Image: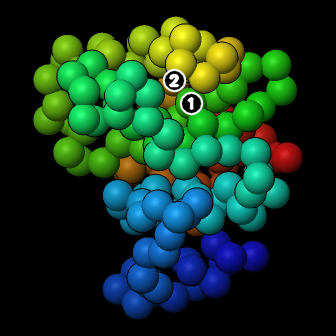
Amino acid sequence: MVLEQIYSQKKNDAPAIRLVQNKMPDSTEEWYWALATYDNDWGTRFSFQLPIGGGTAVRGGMIIDFLYYTPMVATPVFIDGFYWHSVPALERFQRSQVPSLLGAEYGIFAKAPISISSNEIDTLEKVREKFLEIIGPA
């Protein structure tokens, strides 16, 4: 599996982050989460860095890190690095608007967004467990 190859190397020797759906991940954690996505056969059933409400160019807009097209309702996932913990509460509150924004903008029904702290997915085992817990196998 791709993840085993990545994590079998020392952390300092990890390969460079590569494009996911023609977009550059913002962090190593996003890159590893994307690898888990492909390892679990979700490769064609998700969107990466999907802008809603105008994206970051518009106040109140945002970027969803991963949106999985799970059965019945989509599952938005945010990978929160250290920066996110310093963001004002008002901006964090805006995530509660994700389901209604997805419905209005894309016609997609979605669950409440799931936030994953980068320290929750810092090892191969944690990435696999968390991915299967939240998204599950394809």
Picture quarter with the N terminus:
bottom right
Q: Residues within 10 Å of mark 2 (few under 14, many from 20)?
A: some
Front residue (pair 36, 68): 68
| Left or right: residue 48 compared with residue 79 | right
Q: Residue at x 20, y 45 (%)?
A: 83
Spot occupied by residue 101 in the image (x, y as percentages of width and height): 48, 15
Examine the rendered structure and indicate whether residue 7 appears above or below residue 53: below
Residue 92 makes an appearance in the image = no
SS for callout 2: loop
- What residue sits right under mark 2 in the picture? 113
CA distance separating discs 1 and 2: 5 Å
Q: Residue at x 14, y 23 (%)?
A: 88
SS for callout 1: strand
Based on the displayed image, in which of its 4 quarters is residue 127 positioned?
bottom right
Q: Residues within 10 Å of mark 1 (few under 14, many from 20)?
A: many
Based on the displayed image, in which of its 4 quarters is residue 38 positioned?
bottom right
**Where residue 76 is drawn, which disc sits there?**
1
Examine the rendered structure and indicate whether residue 110 appears above or below residue 114: above
Q: Residue at x 68, y 76 (%)?
A: 2
Instruction: Say what amino acid the circle numbered 2 marks.
Output: Pro
Tell me which colouring the rendered structure shows: rainbow
Examine the rendered structure and indicate whether residue 78 appears above or below residue 39: above
Front residue (pair 125, 58): 58
Based on the displayed image, in which of its 4 quarters is residue 62 positioned?
top left
